[in-house]
């Protein structure tokens, strides 16, 4: 099976006030942390979709495909299509976001192994009943992903096919925590210090 990976890192982070991918967390930028959790050896190819030249260079330095999103204002759906076009021969795709600073590579690898046991299912990371990213979509869901518009993402496809969804359970719920604002990043730092 040709499993591909798409890192979606094209958003402008308007709620953050600045480019949040350059925000620091435990000594690394969010962009660097997102790149670091991708287990390259588990994918036939990895595409990093972004509008930022610095992240494109970082992607290339790791041997990943750097896909420029010239129209980030067209929303998540545009980022998804650009990534899918770059990995058009994939049998399944994992989609990651770039703002989960506590996500660990070991968890990503474990989710992939879980998917390989259930290759016809949609797989998402979870903690209890809470669903999060990354998510893996087998080929039979690609058409639905391509039909998304504006700021609709993979969650819309998952909601239409809840019967096919399996959650890969994480022990640490903080791995699911995504940061959309400076306040959320500060809160995550506080929560991390408490554990």
Image (cartoon, rainbow, N blue to C red):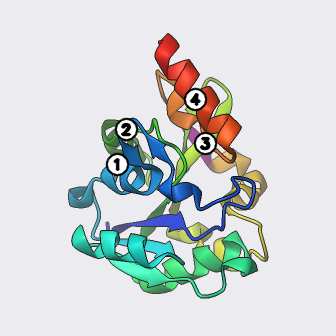
The residue labelled by disc 4 is 188
| Residue at the image position 58 percent from the left and 71 percent from the top | 10
Q: Which residue is mark 2?
A: 104
Residue of label 1: 37
Q: Earlier in the sequence, mark 2 or mark 1?
A: 1
**Residue 16 inside the magenta-drawn segment:** no
Tell me the element at label 2.
Answer: loop
How far apart are the alpha carbons under marks 3 and 2? 13 Å
> Going from the N terminus, do you reach mark 3 or mark 2 first?
2
The residue depicted at 62 percent of the width and 45 percent of the height is: 165
Task: Report the residue marked by disc 3.
Answer: 178
Rendered location of residue 180, percent (x, y): 68, 48
Q: Residues within 10 Å of mark 3 (few under 14, many from 20)?
A: some
Report x, y in % for residue 63.
Answer: 23, 72
Q: Secondary structure at mark 1?
A: loop
Mark 1: few, some, or many residues within 10 Å (few <14, many ≥20)?
some
Mark closer to the chain start, 1 or 4: 1
Inter-mark Cα distance, 1 to 4: 18 Å
């Amino acid at each position: 099976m040709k499993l591909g990976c798409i890192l979606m890192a094209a958003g402008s982070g308007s709620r953050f006030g600045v480019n949040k991918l350059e925000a620091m967390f435990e000594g690394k930028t969010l962009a660097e942390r997102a790149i670091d959790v991708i287990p390259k050896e588990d994918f036939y190819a990895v595409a990093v979709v972004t509008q930022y030249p610095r992240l494109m260079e970082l992607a290339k330095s790791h041997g990943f495909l750097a896909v420029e999103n010239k129209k980030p204002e067209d929303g998540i759906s545009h980022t998804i299509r650009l990534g899918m076009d770059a990995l058009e021969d994939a049998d399944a795709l994992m989609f990651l976001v770039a703002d989960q600073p506590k996500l660990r590579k070991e968890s990503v690898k474990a989710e992939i192994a879980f998917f390989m046991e259930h290759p016809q299912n949609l797989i998402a990371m979870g903690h209890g009943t809470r669903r999060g990213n990354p998510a893996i979509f087998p080929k039979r869901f690609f058409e639905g992903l391509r039909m998304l518009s504006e700021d609709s993402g993979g969650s819309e496809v998952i909601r239409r096919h809840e019967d096919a969804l399996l959650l890969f359970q994480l022990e640490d719920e903080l791995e699911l925590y995504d940061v959309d604002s400076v306040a959320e990043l500060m809160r995550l730092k506080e929560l991390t210090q408490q554990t």
